[in-house]
Image: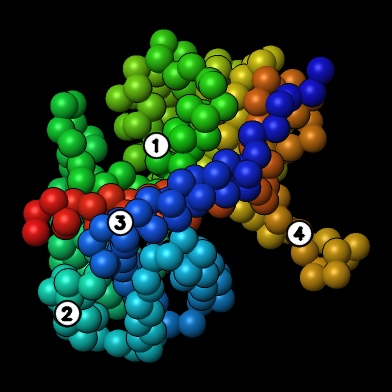
Amino acid sequence: MSAALIDGKAIAATIRGEIRDSVQDLEAHHGRVPGLATVLVGQRKDSETYVRMKKRACAEVGIASFGHELPEDVSQDELLAVVAGLNADPEVHGILVQLPLPDHIDDEAVLAAISLEKDVDGFHPLNIGRLSMKRREPLFVPCTPKGCIELLDRSGIEIAGRNAVVLGRSNIVGLPVAMLLLHRNATLTVCHSRTADLPAMVRQADILVAAVGRPEMVKGDWIKPGAAVIDVGVNAVDDASDPRGYRLVGDVDFEAARAVAGHITPVPGGVGPMTIAMLLQNTLAGFKRSLGAA
Ligand code: GUN
């Protein structure tokens, strides 16, 4: 039996449709639309691509986007001044500073400078702190982790009481997705580079979230039969047969895992499209909250 595919592309398209309808409704009633500001520092190709995709998705659902491109050698003060301007701009309901930032910039200081009400990435220390405690509500939850949970929910996969294993402990994905799974009453294990007998730990997982950034590291025989596998990895590997000279693979050996798992996300087309859909959802939520506060 081969696993059911969790089609993130289709699920994200459904969510974008829901957001587009909401935006149209709100515009009809209030004469205003949500706005997302993106801040890109330097010329990293991957970051440029992500920001371009985010702006394109905004246009598709009727969210206004405001792009700010700053040079690699921008000073921290100049960057903080841009953020302060966006905090004060009533047309902007979400601020996204694309990470990673150049080494000379203290990213924590920049993330902390974003208004809590506009922190659509959910990376402000206070939002992350609230996410890490019981019965505290962050204003926003980070997009990729939120997208992973949404994929499980929309695929009818039970989380409460199941063994969830998170592979990786990054601030952007591993740690926040672990908190979300715990809040949903999963029994949680977080694995990382120092974990002893990783395959044995992963074999316990009813739900596996792989977010380590190592191409096809998780082998088919690490997967518990019937498990739900959420593959966050996006890794380029050389492939002479591909016109681009490379192809994208996840952190999981997809074909081998598919033969064992119950549900699995493909790469590309799994978690990736969900990250942007959740960013749009967060921006819409920020806009609605601003209307309520007005
Ligand atoms: N870099 C990689 N993922 C993300 C993300 O979700 N948000 C931001 N701002 N930067 C990223």
Residue 149 picture location, percent across and down: 45, 33
Q: Residues within 10 Å of mark 3 (few under 14, many from 20)?
A: some
> Who's the residue at 51% across and 50% down the image?
17
Q: CA distance from mark 1 to mark 3?
A: 31 Å
1 or 3: tag closer to the N-terminus: 3
Instruction: Say if mark 2 contacts mark 1, CB within 8 Å.
Output: no
Q: Earlier in the sequence, mark 2 or mark 1?
A: 2
Q: Nearer the viewer, mark 3 or mark 4?
A: 3
**Most foreground residue, 286 or 110:** 286
Neighbor class of circle 2 (other Cα within 10 Å; few <14, some 14-19, many 20+) is: few
Q: Residues within 10 Å of mark 4 (few under 14, many from 20)?
A: some
Label 2–label 4 contact, CB within 8 A: no
Using the numbered discs, state the Cα–Cα distance from disc 2 to disc 4 in whole angstroms.
Answer: 40 Å
Task: Indicate which disc, 4 or 1, sits on the residue closer to the N terminus.
Answer: 1
**Dots 1 and 3: beta carbons under 8 Å?**
no
Tell me how the rendering is colored.
rainbow
* Amino acid type of the residue that numbered disc 1 sits on in the rendered structure: Val
Residue 288 in picture, x, y percent from top left: 23, 52
Q: Type of residue at label 2?
A: Gly
**From this viewpoint, is residue 213 visible?**
no
Q: Quadrant of the N terminus?
A: top right
Q: Nearer the viewer, residue 228 or 291?
A: 291
Q: Which residue is mark 3?
A: 26
Q: Earlier in the sequence, mark 2 or mark 4?
A: 2
Closer to the camera: disc 2 or disc 1? Answer: 2
Residue marked by disc 4? 247
Judging by the rendered image, the residue that carries numbered circle 2 is 85
